Image (cartoon, rainbow, N blue to C red):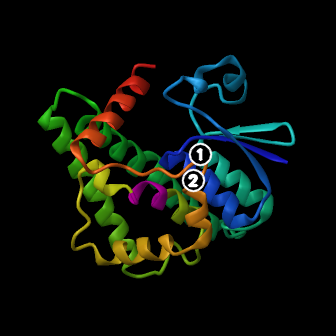
Amino acid sequence: MIELYTASTPNGWKASVALEELGLPYTVHPISLADGDQKTPEFLRICPNGRIPALVDDGFAVFESGAILIYLAEKTGRLMPADVKGRSQVIQWLMFQMAGIGPMMGQANVFFRAMEEKIEPAISRYQNETLRLFEVLDGQLANSEWLTAEYSIADIVNWCWVRLYFWSGVSIEGLSHLQRWMQNMEERPACQRGIAIPEPLDLPTDEAGVEMVSQTSRKILQR
């Protein structure tokens, strides 16, 4: 049995969406980031980096979200082509998310949402780079239904972050191919189930709700 240690974040969703797409049975262990569950000795034995998600498959631990999705794809022979070039294309777009979309949106979230002091040059820097990366995705999707020839883990990892574009303060207006792809992803039952694990995340839009989430984010950043 697969054991998934996760929280309701874009990185956490990657693993749960992939597991749902693959139809693999798994047990969920919710991790409270605000309470510091990710820093306990028990969790650090599974994930030395103290970050979610982490996965244990019959005693074998896997950490880092991208590595988890590659492991699951190779374990099942699904969501990634078997041929060298097809596999490379999927991994290229997976790395694009891991090295670009995730870090840039993450920093935009920190400076735009979580930090009390609003440092405008930093906010502009990360929002502009996020938008540039969205435009790269839009350009790729102009020629293909999915990021590669077939639906894959590359689509999963990018969508789990891009779907929260509004929280980073970035618009996707005019990016019609990206919008079409996002809608297709949203309509997949496995995606709908995966983003509700371990619990649905409803980001507020009113000022009081945003401040409450920001306070939690600041608490996590201090850990």
Do callouts 2 and 1 mark residues in contact (Cβ within 8 Å)? yes
The residue depicted at 42 percent of the width and 70 percent of the height is: 182
The residue shown at (36%, 72%) is: 178
Disc nearest the viewer among 2 and 1: 2
Q: Percent from the top left, x then y, of residue 171?
A: 23, 61
Residue 97 is tagged as none
Q: Quadrant of residue 114?
A: top left
The answer to which image quadrant residue 116 occupies is: top left
Q: For residue 41, what is the image quadrant? A: top right
Q: Is residue 160 magenta?
A: yes
Q: Residue under label 2, please give it.
A: 14
According to the picture, the residue beneath numbered tag 1 turns out to be 65
The span shown in magenta is: 158-163
Left or right: where 193 falls relative to 126 = right
Q: Amino acid at mark 1?
A: Ser
Instruction: Provide residue 200's location: percent of width, then percent of height.
Output: 52, 52
Residue 106 in percent (x, y) is at: 37, 41
Residue 49 in sight from this viewpoint = no
Taking 196 as reference, is 201 left or right? Answer: left
- Between 69 and 161, which is closer to the camera in this rendering? 161
Residue 213, compared with residue 68, is above or below; it is above
Does residue 164 appear left or right of residue 2 in this picture?
Answer: left
Compute the Cα span from label 2 to label 1.
Answer: 7 Å
User: Could you tell me which secondary element the residue under label 1 belongs to?
Assistant: helix
> How many residues crowd around disc 1 within 10 Å: few (fewer than 14), some, or many (20 or more)?
many
The rendered magenta stretch, by its main secondary structure, is classed as helix
- Of the numbered discs 2 and 1, the one sitting upstream in the chain is 2
Magenta stretch: includes residue 85? no
